[in-house]
Image (spheres, coloured by chain):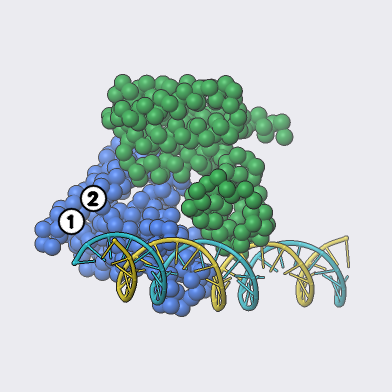
Chain colours: A green, B blue, C yellow, D cyan
Amino acid sequence: MSDRDAPSPMSRSKLVRERIRSQILNGRLKPGARLVEDRLSAELGVSRVPVREALRSLSAEGLVRLEPHRGATVVEVTPQIVAELVEVRALLEGQNARLAARRHDPEIVRQLRETLAHGNTAAEAGTTEELTRLNAEFHERLGEASRNSVLLDVMRGLRERTSLAFAINGRARAREDWKEHAGILEAVIAGDEELAALLAIRHVQNAASAFARNHAANDDAA
Amino acid sequence: MSDRDAPSPMSRSKLVRERIRSQILNGRLKPGARLVEDRLSAELGVSRVPVREALRSLSAEGLVRLEPHRGATVVEVTPQIVAELVEVRALLEGQNARLAARRHDPEIVRQLRETLAHGNTAAEAGTTEELTRLNAEFHERLGEASRNSVLLDVMRGLRERTSLAFAINGRARAREDWKEHAGILEAVIAGDEELAALLAIRHVQNAASAFARNHAANDDAA
DNA sequence: ACTCCTAATATTGTATACGATCCGGAGGCT
DNA sequence: AGCCTCCGGATCGTATACAATATTAGGAGT
C-alpha cells in the first residue's frame, strides 16, 4: 500500500478511521451499507483491532450505527433526523456567527477570505471531493472564530452528519453555498452580529431545503 | 423501549464503561487521575480489550483525555472549559425548554412531575449519588419533551461534562436546583415558551455561578 | 406446501502474545 | 560537575487465536 507521503506519526486506527470516514462522506459507502470487520481489515491490510476502534469512533461521531453482535452499518439519514439535525445546527451556527462577528479576529478573517476564494473557484470547476473539503474548511475556520472549542466540536459533529445527506446537492447548490458563505463573512467582518447570525441560520436551512427538494425528486424517479 | 439495566446480556465493554463512568462522575476517580489499562483490566477482571474500548468511548464523550502512547487520564475541567460548556449548554437547554413548552406533552409532564417530587425529597434528605441520578433524570425527561433526539444526545453529552464540575456544589445548591426545576416545569406546563427558555438558561448559568464561587473558595482554602 | 427445530456458517466479542514507543535513571565523555 | 547517550521498565498499539452469539439453510413432521 502507498503509505509513504505522510510523516507517519499516525496510528493505524486513525488511518483506518479517516479512510472509512472519507469513504462514507464521499458516498462510496452508502447509507445502510454493512461494515464487516473482516472485510475491512483485509481491504485495508490491518488486523481487526484498529478497524474495531475506528468503527467505535465513527459510531460516537454518529456516522456509523453499531448494533451488539450484529455489526456496523453506515447510518441512514431519514428526513426526520435531517430535520432534527438542521434545527440544532442552525441554532449553533447562528450563535457561532454572532460570536465570530463580535470578535472579528483579523487573522481568522484572513484565513476565511482565503478559503472563500478557493471555494469560489472550486464551485465553478472543482471536483465534488474538493467542494466537500473546502466547505468543511470554511465552516471549521468560521467555528474557530468564536473561540469556543466546545461549540466547535459539537458543530463539527453535526456538520459531518448533515453533509452525509447534503453531499448529493450538486453544483448549482454549491454556487449558492459560496454566495451565502461570502455574505456571512461580510457580516462577520462588519461586526454585524445579528446579520451574521441570521445569514448563518438561513445558510443551514437553505442547504436543508435544497436537500429536501433533491430528495423528493430522487424518490419520484425511483 | 429504553434499555434500563438489562439483567445480564451486557457486553463486558459496556459494563466496564459504565463502571468507569460512574467512578468518574462520583468523584472516586479525580480529574487528572491516570487510567492505566493493565491496572483497570486487573481490577475489573477482564482483559485489556474491553477496557480500551471503554476508554475510547469515554474519550468520545469528553470524560477522558487520551494521548497517543501516553494513555488515558480523567479530564481536567478548567474554568475556561466550564465557561465554554455553559455557553453552549445554556443555548441548547433554552431552545429545548422552548420546544418543550410548545408541545407540553401530558405524558412527559406527568413523568417530570414525578421526578420533581422525588428530587424535592432527595434535596432534603438524599445521598449525593441520588441527587446526581435524579438531576440527570429530570434533564433527560425534559430533553425528551422537545422530541428532538439529536438535541437530546448533544445536551446529554454536555450535561455529563458539566456535572463533572458541578457535582461539588453541595446541598444548599441542590435545593436551589429543584426550585428552578419546578419553575421550568411550570412554564412548560403553561406553554409559556419564552419564560421556559429564560428559566432554563438561567438554571444553567446559576449552577455555573455556584460552581465558580465554590471553586474560588476551594482554591483559597488550598 | 408450511412450520418448527436443528445444525452449519458468518460475524462479533474477548483473551493472550508480541512489537513499538515513551520515560527515567545509570554510566561515560568533556 | 554537567550534559549526553544508552539501557531497562512501564505502557500503549497491533496481531493472532479462541469463544460467544446471531443468522441462515435444510430437513423432519404435519
Q: Amino acid at mark 2?
A: Pro
Pointers 2 and 1 within a single chain:
yes
Residue holding disc 1 = B215
Horizontal placement of B77 versus B6: left or right?
left
Q: Are marks 2 and 1 in contact (CB under 8 Å)?
A: yes
User: What residue is at 67 percent from the left and 58 percent from the top?
Assistant: A42
Horizontal placement of C3 versus C13: left or right?
right
Residue holding disc 2 = B79
Chain letter for mark 1: B
Q: Quadrant of residue B21?
A: bottom left
Q: Quadrant of residue A51?
A: bottom right
Where is A161 relative to A186, above or below? below
Could one spot residue B71 in this view of the protein? yes
Q: Residue furthest left?
A: B220
Q: Quadrant of residue A40?
A: bottom right
Q: Amino acid at mark 1?
A: His
Horizontal placement of B97 versus A64: left or right?
left
Q: Position of residue B20 (x, y in %)?
A: 39, 67
Picture quarter with the C terminus of chain A: top right
Q: Earlier in the sequence, mark 2 or mark 1?
A: 2
Where is B53 relative to A80, above or below? below
Where is A220 relative to B62, above or below? above
- Mark 2 burial class by Cα count in 10 Å: few <14, some 14-19, many 20+: some
- Tell me how far mark 2 sits from mark 1, CA to CA: 9 Å
Q: Position of residue A65 (x, y in %)?
A: 56, 53
User: What residue is at 50 percent from the left and 26 percent from the top?
Assistant: A119
> In front: B15, or B67?
B67
User: What residue is at 46 percent from the left and 68 percent from the top?
Assistant: B51
Could one spot residue B101 in this view of the protein? no
- Mark 1 burial class by Cα count in 10 Å: few <14, some 14-19, many 20+: some
